[in-house]
Amino acid sequence: MFEEILKNVQEKTPLVHSITNYVTVNDCANIILACGGSPIMADDINEVEDITSICNTLVINIGTLNERTIDSMIKAGKKANELKHPVILDPVGAGASKFRNDTVKKLLSAVNFSVIRGNISEIKAVNAGSGTTKGVDTDINDAVSNDNLKEVVSFAKALSQKTGAIIAITGAIDIVADSQKAYIIKNGTSAMSKITGTGCMLTTVIASFCGGNYDNLLDSTACAVSAMGICGELALEKVTKLDEGTSSLRTYIIDYMSKINSSILNKKMKIETI
Amino acid sequence: MFEEILKNVQEKTPLVHSITNYVTVNDCANIILACGGSPIMADDINEVEDITSICNTLVINIGTLNERTIDSMIKAGKKANELKHPVILDPVGAGASKFRNDTVKKLLSAVNFSVIRGNISEIKAVNAGSGTTKGVDTDINDAVSNDNLKEVVSFAKALSQKTGAIIAITGAIDIVADSQKAYIIKNGTSAMSKITGTGCMLTTVIASFCGGNYDNLLDSTACAVSAMGICGELALEKVTKLDEGTSSLRTYIIDYMSKINSSILNKKMKIETI
Amino acid sequence: MFEEILKNVQEKTPLVHSITNYVTVNDCANIILACGGSPIMADDINEVEDITSICNTLVINIGTLNERTIDSMIKAGKKANELKHPVILDPVGAGASKFRNDTVKKLLSAVNFSVIRGNISEIKAVNAGSGTTKGVDTDINDAVSNDNLKEVVSFAKALSQKTGAIIAITGAIDIVADSQKAYIIKNGTSAMSKITGTGCMLTTVIASFCGGNYDNLLDSTACAVSAMGICGELALEKVTKLDEGTSSLRTYIIDYMSKINSSILNKKMKIETI
């Protein structure tokens, strides 16, 4: 199944429209190309509908949020919903300011997201902004481990139920869940947190994978998360061998994504359902 | 002649003012430095005239266009025209939205461009926006090949006649033409399309070359296009040899640009006039 | 002492809030992580106070200044002052436009900076904007050398006296001074000027070092300047050995920053007080 997902991305070259932050945007564009998609970044309110219409999928990333682009995000999101394109939310830094929390709330009420990807604290902030009822328990620590895994999976499933979106919580252990089913993914390495943008990049890889596989968003998201982790592992091996540092790690993650194939996936994926 | 052009860039260190997109801006700044120029990025309406006045050349790139910067582009463009600085247009994504098409039209009517560089579909969109008369045939496919080369050259010459700008159409085969003369350049590799920003970077290399060679813009543009292609070829050789990927390719393109010299140009240029 | 400073950064992981330009922002985020800090970029007026409040230090960089973000800079700066966080100014391109000069003047009158870092011409522009009295002589050439070193040190000390900020003037020879004491640092290499953003990156390293060492800003700034120079030297050695170019140099500077330790500092620092 995962080979099929990867093949679809590489053969269909999905166009990914991103409204995103200016910190990691170049890495995002490059990793979209590396994994088989094609990137377009456009955030002006006068063109976001046109651009989304010629694309296959939309990424909304709030990393360097500003008032001008929030309206663009909503307009693009609504258009993508209308066209039934997958819409992926990366709630970067949700929880860090009232402005981000309010924006997440606004986005969640205006746009139907297909996938929401963040670390546990961002996803908890999304949960806080996703409704007034307190049906979902959020008393979870900020690190996902084998100890609290079941609890976090239940939280993810409940949040998926509430939002209608697949929830991807990434960290030392990654969880990808809809309301019924969850994947646990143990690829990746903590070294990835020493470079900026691995989260943002992953979100755009998810978007590319979903853009090539409209009918299979849960598996595509899980596959993208695992693929990114694998690239991180391979990159770290190379950096360690060559005694290099974090900037080389970034380069190699994108390098390996540009060479990912089904045989690497088969050999390296550490993924199970729960 | 091409050695002379390169020498002028490297000796004069032309200052290049860019109003550009936030996706590829860092690569653009680095490749301007690599080829011998010096970059300044500034887009606020309150300073674009001041900045352009201390520079030698101006790049206008519409990659992540927004309403705020369009006025800055026009103001800077008019000032650069007044000062007789070369002004280079990169109509990124022209054709993809009404907003971009309208902006291209606005720019073309307000500013005299010295060079316009894009892929064939962008240049066709520029043509559509460059006047009401339909004197120039645009019924050309979106890939330039040996089969339609003469047709595209005629189109480029006619568009140059209409706009007063040198037209650089880049792709598998590159064409650089004014109304009288055209260069056909066969350097480069398709791998360059797997990284973001090779087009944007090339535009800034053209700007640097033109900034050091005011009296010879056509040859300078052709030389820049060829030099960029050569760097792509050398980078791909290295990536292939080391079994690396697309992010390393990007690094090496800029690396090779920082080491370009007349002996490499002489050995590698695949350029002819038509 | 310098080992202690480095250890504090690496153990405390200071959060660095940057309001900065979009040209070098990714390199800045990556080098903050490399040296031991954690980056947050946020520039919207609605959240800068919230963001600064959860951080340890603030960087204000005017590289791609625009009207929207000036108010954010001032608001964040005042909040950081209130919280007694170190605030670091990078007056990129000061002197190049009236808009930048006016903004520097505005910033200096609204915010108390802990450190101001620039090249000699930027720092001279800061001096011109730092008051109406002409008490500080600025008749200094745009290159700091052994010949005019004493003069520049006096200038830096006087400017520090006037502004209350530590003054870091970087170039072939670096000077870090408060009103009483100055460090002369001779690490680094001219090759660093062939990549964009070494200045901006250094400013964020200074911010990280100051964020981990509130009680010792002068020594921390000097240590950061020296560390950055050492990374440049090591990177150039590697690039030269491998016959690579400027983009690899950028990668290796960040790589070496991610591996800096007290034994490298002890062996390589070229620092003296005057």
Image (spheres, coloured by chain):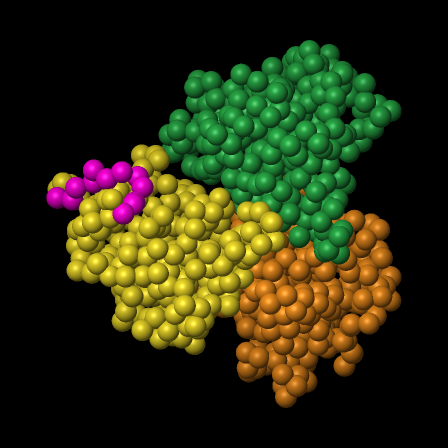
Chain colours: A green, B yellow, C orange
**Looking at the image, can residue A129 be seen?**
no
Q: In terms of secondary structure, what is the magenta stretch mainly?
A: loop
Residue in the foreground of this view, choosing between C228 and B110: C228
Where is residue B175 drawn, in percent x and y?
Answer: 29, 54
Q: Quadrant of residue B53?
A: bottom left
Q: Is residue B197 magenta?
A: no
Q: Residue at x 64, y 80 (%)?
A: C152
Q: What is the x, y in percent for residue C133?
A: 58, 75
Q: Residue B52 or B114: which is nearer the viewer?
A: B114
Work out which quarter of the rendered image holds the N terminus of chain B and state it.
bottom left
Q: Is residue B139 magenta?
A: yes
The magenta-colored residue range is B135-146
Residue B170 sits above or below residue A112 on the image: below
Q: Is residue C48 above or below residue B214?
A: above
Residue A187: tell me if it is visible. Answer: yes
- Which of B253 and C203 lies nearest the eye of the viewer? B253
| Residue B272 image point, x, y percent | 28, 61
Q: Nearer the viewer, residue C57 or A86?
A: A86
Query: Which residue lies at the image location 57% right of the left edge and 69% below the top edge?
Result: C193
